[in-house]
Amino acid sequence: MGFRFDRFATLYIVNPLRRRAPDNESSIPILMYHSISDEDETKVHAYYRTATTPLTFAQHMLYLRDLGYSTIDVAGAVSLLRNGRLTKKYVVVTFDDGYADFYTHAFPVLSRNGFTATVFLPTRYIGTSPVRFKEKDCLTWSEVRELRRYGISFGSHTVTHPQLSTLNGRNIKDEIVNSKQTIEDNLGESVDSFAYPFAFPEQDSSFVRMLRKVLVESGYRHGVSTRIGTARGKEDPYFLRRLPMNSLDDISLFSAKLQGGYDWLHAIQYGSKLLRNWSR
């Protein structure tokens, strides 16, 4: 794996300091998974990996169970954070991209531990038979309906999974509205949550304001982004921060992320976005 500065700083600098000066603001970790598979990502930088092995995922869920965490959905997290201090340990488990390996590898583990999760679907790739996205099969609508009967929640991840900031206003609205409508038509219930695909352009305040307006007008009530960190009550409920997960998250790093020890990386993430904008 090699040396990882983010892991070193989190485990040996930030998290020890955080424990000495505890944060009094309530926060809830929202975990961001993608594929639960043995996909080989050795050529991908650790920061950008999105696959989590079934073994690692099982270890994560067992750790959460052993520590007494309860899983809730995004709506539940928003409500609890608005109401102030938490009386229990809560976690939101999310999956982007709607891969079929959620059904085969993640869902059985979640069920064994008494957990639920939210899956965000890019609806063009969810069909009556498996459709491939990024060289992996996605869920089918019959699987989505079955999972919903067992308590799994679903939200929108757009239609085609584009970087929305590169589109015009009409196409942005189409991606947001049509994906919501398609999921609602197939599940027979309202869809309230949205997950932004790709890097979230938080440095572009005018775009963020426009996007929020479209989400509100389209009937969404909350959402998540790829901004790094635990979710907090003062955040915009439409763009909550999440904690990226992959196969390199051993239990030490996983535990530190749950505790807020990885939140420092958001400042680096935001700064790099500003720098890229400035250099263009």
Image (cartoon, helix red, strand yellow):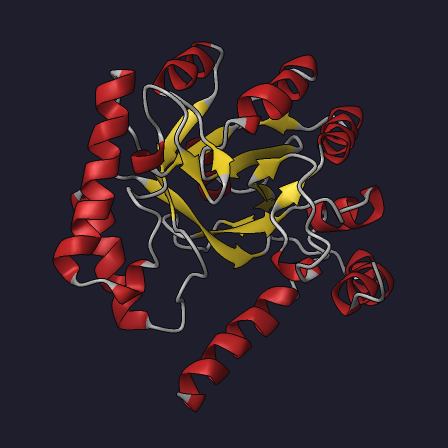
Which of 18/191 is in front?
A: 191
Quarter of the image where the C terminus is located: bottom left
Q: Is residue 33 left or right of residue 167?
A: right
**How many numbered badges does the structure rendering display?**
0
Residue at 45% from the left image edge and 39% from the top image edge: 97
Q: Residue at x 24, y 45 (%)?
A: 176
Residue 76, visible in the rendered structure: no
Question: What is the residue that sits farthest to the bottom in this orientation?
Answer: 279
Percent x, y of residue 243: 60, 50
Task: Please tell me whether residue 165 is drawn above or below residue 40 in the rendered image.
Answer: below
Which residue: 68% across, 62% down? 45
63 vs 170, left or right, is: right
The answer to whether residue 35 of the structure is visible from this angle is yes
Residue drawn at the location 44% of the way across and 56% of the way down: 198
Q: Quadrant of the N terminus?
A: bottom right
From the top left corner, tell me how far across and down residue 270 is, in percent: 51, 72
Q: Nearer the viewer, residue 69 or 127?
A: 127
Q: In screen coordinates, is 34 left or right of 251? A: left
Q: Going by the image, does 23 lie left or right of 210?
A: right
Question: Residue 188 placed where, x, y %?
Answer: 25, 16
Residue 253, above or below 251: below
Locate residue 56, reporting x and y percent. 76, 35
Q: Is residue 150 above or below residue 60?
A: above
